[in-house]
Every structure is written in structure tokens, then in C-alpha cells.
């Protein structure tokens, strides 16, 4: 079931691309399967079995986690928890 508060397709067609960052995930289509935002940090999971942490302000990849056994279908940032590597905790499914 699709949530009612999602942006409808007729509105999405008016969106404009303001930046494009190739190489975050493999070129297989669709490359990015899920995404979460925490401040200036974008976390993506992909069909290439990897997770990429990207800083939109610096336009740099902060971290890349490869080696998952399946496509990454869900990522979630927990801003109140801290990992040893990032300033937030990631939950990956």
C-alpha cells in the first residue's frame, strides 16, 4: 500500500535536477533502492549490495560499506546514537 502523503507522479514530473553524482552505486538499474537523510548526510542502499554515506555539502563520499549478501532494501540514520566511525548510527536491512 502506498502512503497517501507521498508526492504524486504529476507533481514529480515538474521537479528539476540540480545535481547529479555518478558512481555512488553500480550502474545496474535501479542502482539506489533506499535512502535516508540526516542533516547534510545522505545514506543510500543499493542493488549492488552496498551502502554509501554521502555528504551533500562537500559532495564527497564519507564512507562505503560493501559485502552485504543481498540488495540493501532499507537504511535508517539514528541521530541520537553514535558509532565509532560516523556521528550517527546506521541501521541496514
Image (spheres, grey):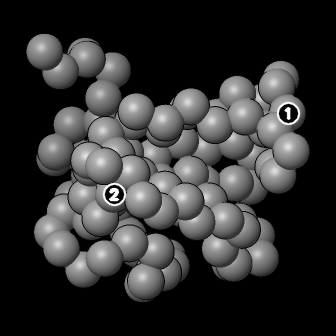
Residue 12 drawn at (x, y percent):
26, 52
Per the image, the residue denoted by label 1 is 82
Which residue is drawn at the image coordinates 26% and 47% (left, top)? 70
74 relative to 15, above or below:
above
Please tell me which residue lies in front, 30 or 13: 30
Label 1: element kind: loop
Please tell me which residue lies in front, 47 or 69: 69
Q: Residues within 10 Å of mark 2 (few under 14, many from 20)?
A: some
In the picture, the quarter occupied by the C terminus is: top left
62 relative to 5, above or below:
below
Instruction: Report whether residue 54 is seen.
Output: no
Which residue is drawn at the image coordinates 24% and 80% (left, top)? 27
Residue 37 drawn at (x, y percent):
61, 44
Label 2: element kind: loop
Q: Quadrant of residue 3?
A: top left
Badge number at residue 44: none
Which residue is drawn at the image coordinates 13% and 15% (left, top)? 1
Badge number at residue 49: 2
1 and 2 marks in contact (CB < 8 Å): no
Q: CA distance from mark 1 to mark 2?
A: 23 Å
Please tell me which residue lies in front, 21 or 19: 21
Q: How many marks?
A: 2
Q: Quadrant of residue 22?
A: bottom left
Residue 85 drawn at (x, y percent):
82, 52
Residue 33 drawn at (x, y percent):
29, 50
Amino acid at each position: 500500500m502506498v502512503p497517501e502523503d507521498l508526492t504524486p507522479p504529476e507533481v514529480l514530473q515538474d521537479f528539476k535536477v540540480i545535481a547529479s553524482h555518478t558512481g555512488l552505486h553500480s550502474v545496474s538499474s535501479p542502482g539506489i533502492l533506499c535512502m535516508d537523510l540526516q542533516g547534510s548526510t545522505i545514506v543510500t542502499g543499493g542493488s549492488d549490495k552496498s551502502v554509501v554515506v554521502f555528504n551533500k555539502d562537500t559532495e564527497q563520499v564519507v564512507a562505503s560499506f560493501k559485502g552485504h549478501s543481498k540488495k540493501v532494501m532499507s537504511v535508517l540514520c539514528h541521530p541520537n546514537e553514535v558509532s565509532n566511525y560516523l556521528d550517527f548510527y546506521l541501521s541496514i536491512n
